[in-house]
Image (cartoon, helix red, strand yellow):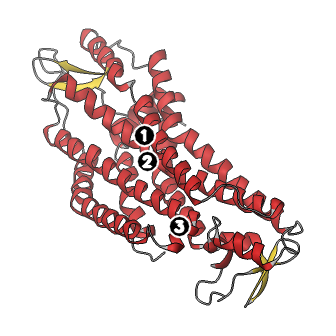
């Protein structure tokens, strides 16, 4: 199957100098989306952030939040994800909108590098924030398994919160370090007709095209290929694999757990009460039916089932029907829906150069779909009672 015809990658004037390309229909679509995100997404995430911080401040001294480590850590992760949404909108939307309107770069090479760095930094941060939620879910399931095997909770609510805070700090450090290649790869090129912020490899191709338009090659340079692959892997594909294996672990372990005899089933009521009221959030054990919760702590029985007022159900189903588990699944699903299309197409750079040119000139609007994730997230967790 032959590839569709593409427009020339560069345009020359009558003197053989590079000229400013014309605005494409997808550029206008992207401008409209960017304005929408600034006018709607920014205040929406700001409102949710204010609500979540208020929820934390109001509940940080409550007995419930102190005893339920999973609840307090998940609230921290939601605050972090909302903050990352705001960072992504503020880093990407204003600068990209100005760039699309001018279609040139008038702001110097230093700002060129800083803007590109901020885009990649915020993208890494978003992926790591989603991965942090998955890691927290894995840790919660592990703690449930620890109770099943040893009859006690490992650590306490303070240790859970410290772990999540360290996870958040590590995500910022990793994002900052992994985005450093932007300062090397992006430069400002200037010609008599226009100036532009671009990569060193696009600059090399442009110079070759000016010197010999009929024979200049559009092949990808080896170092450019490494650069692109590195960022594809660190921004999306490695986090995607981490999400996949995290939830594979969760599902496998919970199913396996539901088939095992529950070792605490013969424990005293005091031990059962301790295991429920301490670090394992009662949502993970008691919110399998949010409409008719049992007034008493659930009583564990054999083979990984738990007796409630409504009957006996598998322990893995209680976890999967908890509000926190459902919310985390929805957040991750939204992330994959928004991020997957562009990143799948971006892999075409390693298959065929013509596909790369086609995507960069006609399908770049898919990148903006990633930013839509920042508008979806608040509706998943921002207006729901905990």
Instruction: Rate crowding at label 3 as few (under 14), some (14 to 19) or many (20 or more) other CA atoms within 10 Å.
Output: some
Q: In the rendered view of the protein, which quadrant contains the N terminus?
A: top right
Distance of label 2 from label 3 (alpha carbons): 28 Å
User: In the rendered image, which residue does mark 3 sit on?
Assistant: 66
- Secondary structure type for disc 2: helix
Quick one: label 3 or label 1, which is nearer the N terminus?
3
Quick one: label 2 or label 1, which is nearer the N terminus?
2
Q: Is 155 placed above or below 354 here?
A: below
Q: Where in the figure is residue 140, as x and y percent of width and height?
A: 65, 59
Q: Where in the figure is residue 73, as x and y percent of width and height?
A: 52, 59
Horizontal side of 275 relative to 5 (left or right) equals right
Is label 2 in contact with label 1 (beta carbons under 8 Å)?
Answer: no
Nearer to us: label 3 or label 1? 3
Nearer to us: label 2 or label 3? 3
Horizontal side of 140 relative to 192 (left or right) equals right
Nearest the eye: 13 or 258:
258
User: In the rendered image, which residue does mark 2 sit on?
Assistant: 126
Distance of label 3 from label 1 (alpha carbons): 27 Å
| Residue at position x 38%, y 37% in the image | 121
Distance of label 2 from label 1 (alpha carbons): 10 Å
Residue 242: image quadrant is: top right
| Residue at position x 30%, y 28% in the image | 8
Q: Where in the figure is residue 366, as x and y percent of width and height?
A: 39, 48
Nearest the eye: 365 or 290:
290
Instruction: Rate crowding at label 1 as few (under 14), some (14 to 19) or many (20 or more) other CA atoms within 10 Å.
Output: some
Nearest the eye: 231 or 249:
249
Q: What is the number of the mark on residue 261?
A: none
- Secondary structure type for disc 1: helix
User: In the rendered image, which residue does mark 1 sit on?
Assistant: 172
- Secondary structure type for disc 3: helix
Quick one: label 2 or label 3, which is nearer the N terminus?
3
- Residue farthest toward the top in the current orientation of the protein: 211
């Amino acid at each position: 199957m032959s590839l569709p015809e593409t427009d020339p990658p560069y345009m020359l004037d009558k003197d053989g100098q590079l000229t400013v390309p014309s605005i494409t229909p997808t550029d206008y679509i992207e401008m409209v989306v960017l304005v929408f995100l600034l006018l709607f997404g920014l205040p929406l995430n700001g409102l949710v952030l204010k609500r979540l911080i208020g929820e934390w401040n109001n509940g940080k001294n409550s007995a419930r939040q102190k005893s339920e480590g999973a609840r307090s850590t998940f609230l921290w992760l939601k605050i972090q994800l909302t903050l990352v949404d705001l960072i992504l909108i503020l880093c990407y939307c204003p600068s990209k909108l100005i760039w699309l309107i001018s279609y040139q770069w008038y702001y110097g090479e230093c700002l060129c590098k800083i803007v590109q760095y901020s885009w990649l930094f915020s993208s890494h941060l978003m992926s790591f924030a989603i991965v942090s939620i998955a890691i927290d879910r894995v840790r919660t399931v592990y703690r449930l398994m620890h109770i099943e095997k040893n009859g006690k909770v490992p650590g306490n609510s303070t240790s859970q919160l410290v772990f999540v805070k360290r996870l958040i700090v590590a995500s910022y450090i990793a994002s900052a370090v992994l985005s450093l290649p932007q300062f090397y790869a992006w430069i400002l090129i200037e010609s008599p007709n226009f100036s532009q912020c671009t990569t060193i490899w696009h600059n090399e191709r442009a110079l070759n095209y000016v010197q010999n338009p009929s024979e200049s090659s559009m092949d990808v340079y080896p170092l450019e290929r490494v650069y692109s692959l590195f960022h594809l892997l660190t921004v999306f594909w490695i986090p995607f694999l981490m999400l996949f294996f995290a939830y594979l672990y969760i599902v496998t372990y919970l199913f396996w757990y539901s088939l095992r005899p529950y070792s605490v089933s013969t424990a005293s009521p005091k031990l059962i009460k301790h295991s429920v009221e301490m670090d394992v959030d009662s949502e993970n054990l008691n919110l399998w039916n949010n409409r008719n919760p049992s007034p008493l702590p659930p009583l564990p029985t054999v083979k990984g089932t738990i007796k409630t007022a409504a009957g006996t159900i598998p322990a893995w189903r209680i976890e999967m029907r908890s509000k926190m588990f459902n919310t985390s699944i929805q957040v991750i699903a939204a992330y994959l829906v928004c991020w997957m299309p562009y990143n799948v197409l971006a892999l075409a750079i390693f298959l065929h150069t013509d596909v790369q040119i086609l995507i960069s000139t006609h399908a770049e609007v898919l990148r903006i779909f990633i930013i839509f994730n920042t508008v979806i997230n608040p509706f998943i967790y921002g207006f729901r009672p905990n």
